[in-house]
Amino acid sequence: MTETRVPRGATVRLGTVTGDLRAEPNSRIEVDGRLVVPGEVHFKGKSEVGGDLECRYFRAEDGTVRIGGGLSVQEDIHCEDAILEVDGELKARDVDVDRGLRVKGAIHGRTFDVGGFLEGGSTLEATRVSVGGLVRLSGKMIAQDVEAGGSIDIADVDLDTLEAGGLVHIGGGTVRQRIKVGGRFVSDAPTEFGALDAGGFAEFRGDGTGGSVKVGGFFTARGNLTFTTLDAGGFGTIEGNARGTDVKVGGRFRVGGSLELAGDLEVGGYISVAKEIGADRLELGGKLSARRAVIRTTAEVGGAVDIPGGLKAQRVTLGHRARAAGPLVGGTVELRDRAKADDLYGESVVLRERASARRVFATNVRLDDGADAEEITYVQSAEISPRARTASPPRKVDQLPPFPL
């Protein structure tokens, strides 16, 4: 196949050539409309094309190559120890650039492997994008998998997976499967996601809708958040309403609205909910505060609960030395040894050794040794140990007053 050569330091004008094109360092190619090369274009060192370029293969090495218009490559782009700059649109099949890729127009390709940076002034459509350093895109990125060892800054996304070791900043969009961030994740607008794993810091500035959320560091949602599971090992805040299946809090977490769960709420640290909590089961080893809570099955409190409007469950258990501020309501309410609560309402209420409550309203009541209640109102039975204390004798009634919740 014939070859057209551009000598070192030369400036030439070309239109359509036959065969391949090879340009030496510090060369410039002026273009009559569009430079068309049916074979391979090979640039060595710093080179420049003054307009559009179309070829079958594109190769560059040891320098920066600037295309003053668009670049359309039928097959692959391979740049070894080089930077590729394109002023217009870029089209190729597979792109492999060692040092950096900068494109002002739209970018189209199948795979992009960039060792340094990838910067785009418009949109990018691909199957896979892998960058060792920085990704910055002013428009929308449509792809399956995107990963960067450094930072990612994209205006809008439509992806399957998104992974970065440093900062991820997106304007919003959809990540269908997984977001994994070792550093910081920030989304400015409503975002849909399959799963979020943030080892550092994560922030949704708009509403978030997705699957599992795992936060090892700091987490913030400025709006509402919908999820399947939320595992917060660090510190977190949801300023709006939170809706999901299960929540596990090992650190400190705050919800500015309501928390509604189809499954379990497990708290080993501290959780604060400004409005209401709804869940299937509650397991509390740390501290919980909310306006009120309705638990569909069991609530086990091993730490402290502060709920002025009341905590209701089929079975409420206040563990050893646990504390409850606000009424406890259940089919069965049990205070274990040295537990302390305010008012108790239930079909059956039991105070174990040295447990104490202010008022008790139940069908059946039992106070063990050392238990303490200021007032007891019951319907069927009141089994009071001789070593229990009551401020006034238990009062039997035909009907209990309405229970809270």
Image: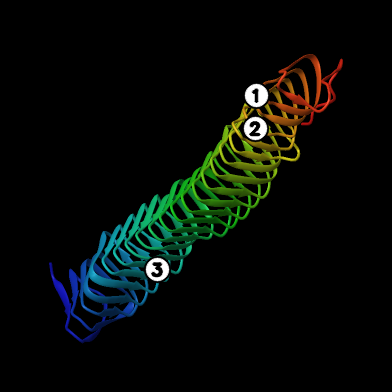
Where residue 397 appears, as percent x and y from the top left, is 86, 17
- Residue 351, picture quadrant: top right
Left or right? Give the position of 171 relative to 57: right
- Residue 269, picture quadrant: top right
| Residue topped by disc 2 | 339
| Residue topped by disc 1 | 352
The amino acid at mark 2 is Ala
Front: mark 3 or 1: 1
Nearer to me, 401 or 352 = 352
Task: Identify whether 36 is placed above or below 249.
Answer: below
Where residue 339 appears, as percent x and y from the top left, is 65, 32
The answer to which of marks 1 and 2 sits earlier in the sequence is 2
The answer to which of marks 3 and 1 sits earlier in the sequence is 3
Left or right? Give the position of 162 relative to 364: left
The structure residue drawn at horizontal position 43% and vertical position 52%, both measured from the top left corner, is 199
* The C terminus: image quadrant: top right
| Residue topped by disc 3 | 119
Residue reaching furthest to the right: 398
Name the element at disc 3: strand
Task: Identify whether 187 is placed above or below 42.
Answer: above
The amino acid at mark 3 is Glu
The CA distance from mark 3 to mark 1 is 67 Å
